[in-house]
Image (cartoon, helix red, strand yellow):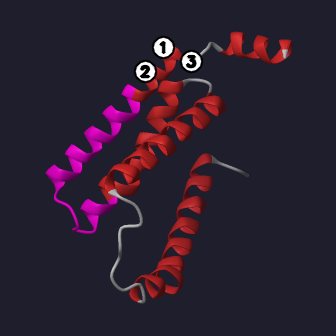
Amino acid sequence: MRTRVGALLASGAVAAVVTFVGVVYFFEPIAASGGAVEVPVPAPLGFLIYIVLSVLLLDWVSGIVGRPIKAAQIISASQIILVSVDFVLRGERGATTGAASAVLIFATWVAMAAVYTRLAPTRRSHDAAVEIA
């Protein structure tokens, strides 16, 4: 019998095993041999690349989900878990800094989605344009 609780527990167990094995046998050996890190591009170019990738991610997830604000909530929740929560729990960031990071991440994605919603063509007009072409 399939249940949501069973699926959640099994997913959590798999996440724990894959993450632990991946960190211990894959990530840590690579990180340990890395040496000094050089910045691959100038800071302004890196920022621009980050923004372009973020906008493309929002567009892609919005297309799948169908609602940009919901897409922004999904992306920001994922990013908050991966960055803010993880860093706080590992002791690499204080709780206040983690909370501030979470607020900034959420505000950024929701603001992007609000502008995207306002300026993007509606789904119906997009589908009509595809049919005409």
CB atoms of marks 1 and 2 within 8 Å: yes
124 versus 116 height, above or below? above
Disc on res. 118: 1
Estimate the spatial distance between the alpha carbons at disc 2 and disc 3, rounded to whole Å. Answer: 10 Å
**Label 3: few (<14), some (14–19) or many (≥20) C-alpha neighbours in 10 Å:** few
Residue identifier under label 3: 120
120 versus 93 height, above or below? above
Q: Is residue 93 on the magenta stretch? A: yes
Residue drawn at (33%, 82%), measured in percent from left and top?
36
Q: Give the residue type at disc 2.
A: Ala
Q: Is residue 122 left or right of residue 117?
A: right
Magenta-tinted stretch: 86-111
Q: Give the residue type at disc 1.
A: Arg
CB atoms of marks 2 and 3 within 8 Å: no
> For this rendering, which residue is in front, 65 or 108?
108
Residue identifier under label 2: 114
Q: Give the residue type at disc 3.
A: Ala
Estimate the spatial distance between the alpha carbons at disc 1 and disc 2, rounded to whole Å. Answer: 6 Å
CB atoms of marks 3 and 1 within 8 Å: yes
Residue drawn at (58%, 30%), measured in percent from left and top?
62
- Residue 15 is situated, as x and y percent measured from the top left of the image, at 54, 65
> For this rendering, which residue is in front, 76 or 56?
56
- Residue 102 is situated, as x and y percent measured from the top left of the image, at 29, 44
> For this rendering, which residue is in front, 10 or 93?
93
Q: Is residue 108 on the magenta stretch? A: yes
Position of the C terminus, as image quadrant, is top right
Q: Quadrant of residue 41?
A: bottom left
> For this rendering, which residue is in front, 94 or 41?
41
Q: Disc count in the image?
A: 3
42 versus 78 height, above or below? below
